[in-house]
Amino acid sequence: MTVSARSATAEDDTFLFEVFCSSRADLSLLPDEVRGPILEMQFKAKQAQYASSFPDANQSILVFEEKPVGTTLVNEDTELRLVDIAILPEFRNRGIGTAFIQQLCLSGKAITLHVAHGNPAENLYRRLGFQEIQRDDVYIEMRRPSGLVI
């Protein structure tokens, strides 16, 4: 499977928002006139928080079969931090996330991430060699040591 990632540009803002909205099923029952402004506010807050916390991170668009299918935010330092990954619903469960994370593993660096309790992606991360290193009431912090064979 070939999945590529290209750096996001200002022209990708609409797509970034679309992917963000697709990951917020918890708001789907709200009326459009309420849901739209809430999603816009949350998206802007998330983008601002990421820019503040990870100013050197690379926001990318995941591309599969020449179509944009998701987004990632990866911060690279002595290790990689997968800050965010989101894939449009119609492209989930096709191995796209797995393929992208396997590409990250090729860097040879340790990789850390956070996943919400109950998120099915936790199983994916465990299959790829991530281990829990800490948890709180909302998130599990996971790490994949450097040097693991894919």
Image: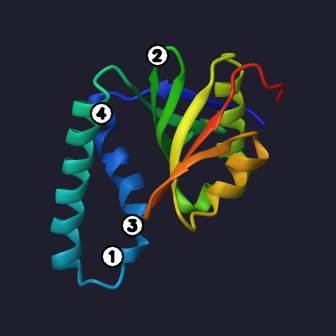
As displayed, is residue 34 above or below residue 130? Answer: below
N-terminal of the pair, mark 4 or mark 2, is 4
For mark 3, what is the residue? 24
Q: Give the SS element for disc 1.
A: helix
- Indicate the position of residue 2 as horizontal and vertical percent values: 73, 32
Quarter of the image that includes the N terminus: top right
Q: Are marks 4 and 2 in contact (CB under 8 Å)?
A: no
In this view, the mark in front (3 or 2): 2
Q: Amino acid at mark 3?
A: Arg
Q: Are marks 3 and 2 in contact (CB under 8 Å)?
A: no
Q: Give the SS element for disc 3.
A: loop
| Marks 4 and 2, how far apart at CA | 27 Å
Disc ID at residue 11: 4
Residue at 43%, 62% in the rendered image = 138
For mark 1, what is the residue? 27
| Marks 1 and 2, how far apart at CA | 35 Å
In this view, the mark in front (1 or 2): 2
Q: Is 74 or 67 nearer to us in this picture?
A: 74
Q: Give the SS element for disc 2.
A: loop
